[in-house]
Amino acid sequence: MMKHIPVLLDAVVNALGDIRGAHIVDCTFGAGGYTRAFLNAGADVIAFDRDSTVVPMADEIKSEFGERFTFVPRPFSYLSELPDKYDAIVFDLGISSMQIDNSERGFSFRGNAPLDMRMDSSAQCDNAADLIKKLSVSELTQILRDYGDVSRAGILARAIKDKMPQTTFALRDLIYNPRDIAPVFQALRIAVNDEFGEIRRALSAVPDKLKTNGKCICVTFHSLEDRLVKNTFREWTTVPGAAYMPNVSDAPFSLIKPQTPTSGEVVANPRARSAHMRGVIKIREI
Ligand SMILES: C[S@@+](CC[C@H](N)C(=O)[O-])C[C@H]1O[C@@H](n2cnc3c(N)ncnc32)[C@H](O)[C@@H]1O
């Protein structure tokens, strides 16, 4: 299995600046690439991940950095429950290479496996096959449209409901337009893991959980995620009630320059190609 190569790591580290002695929340531990870079640069890190398969990697980092690192095996919407305020809160959204490459987890249409797609396989939530069973045709249509921009979503939703696929190949074989295969898998994955609900809940906790001069950085991998983050940051950097007369000096946050990967990074790591980094800095208490 391919080890996850952190995406836009240099851009994120540069955006954070000098983090010696800082307290950082890494909301998406993954293989610990970001966390390790923050620890090596002198910060203390609290990291979330809801996928229990990352625990051995978190244990390894714990044995190296001791008290300076805490792993929280929970969804990042738990951010609102953390007791303190932090110097930075970082999200590297989506799934890791370990998740997509482990064909048994059902995220990928390149290997045959039960149609699971749960990031937390121990969670009580429905897997993709169960979700398909529960949804009506119109609910499934909405998911394919909203989270995958799938063409002729209604016809496809009806076909999926008729066949009730139990495996990744059974689902893949129902999708007549090859260009829709990846978007259909993406849409179901987003729905199974309530990915946008998680992002919304976590982002709504960020303003309160950041210290003044604290930064929130998000790396996104598809346009829907990016739009959600961009619109949220735009709200924070605009004076409330004056959406059409932005007056950045009075807003509680200001924007950090967005970044995309260099062509060199995309060549070295093709999974970086659709990534966007966005960030904000909290300039005053709200
Ligand atoms: C792209 S990877 C992060 C990679 C990491 N930055 C690194 O350098 O190794 C995303 C990780 O976030 C986790 N994740 C996604 N959504 C989550 C959520 N709502 N709560 C907690 N973890 C989540 C996934 O399980 C996955 O391990």
Image (cartoon, helix red, strand yellow):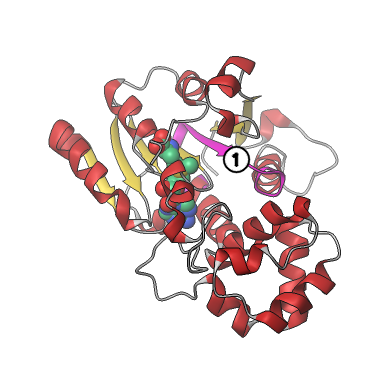
Can residue 34 be seen in this snapshot? yes
The image position of residue 171, as x and y in percent, is 64, 67
Left or right: where 145 falls relative to 52? right
In this picture, residue 75 sits left or right of residue 22: right
- Residue sitting at x 37%, y 51%: 49
Q: Which amino acid does label 1 sit on?
A: Thr
Name which residue lies at 46% across and 44% down.
96
Q: Give the range drawn in magenta.
A: 207-226
For the question of whether residue 86 can be seen, the reply is no
Q: Where is residue 47 in the image (x, y as percent from the top left)?
A: 33, 44
The residue carrying mark 1 is 220
Mark 1 element type: strand
Can you say which quadrant of the picture contains the C terminus? top right
Quadrant of res 133: bottom right
Instruction: From the viewer's perspective, tell me whether residue 198 is left or right of residue 274.
Output: left
Quarter of the figure with residue 284? top right
In the image, 48 versus 213, the foreground residue is 48
Relative horizontal placement of residue 25, taking residue 240 as reference (left or right) = left
Question: Is residue 222 depicted above or below 140 in this figure?
Answer: above
Q: Does the magenta stretch include residue 170?
A: no
Q: Which of 193 and 19 is in front in this view?
A: 193
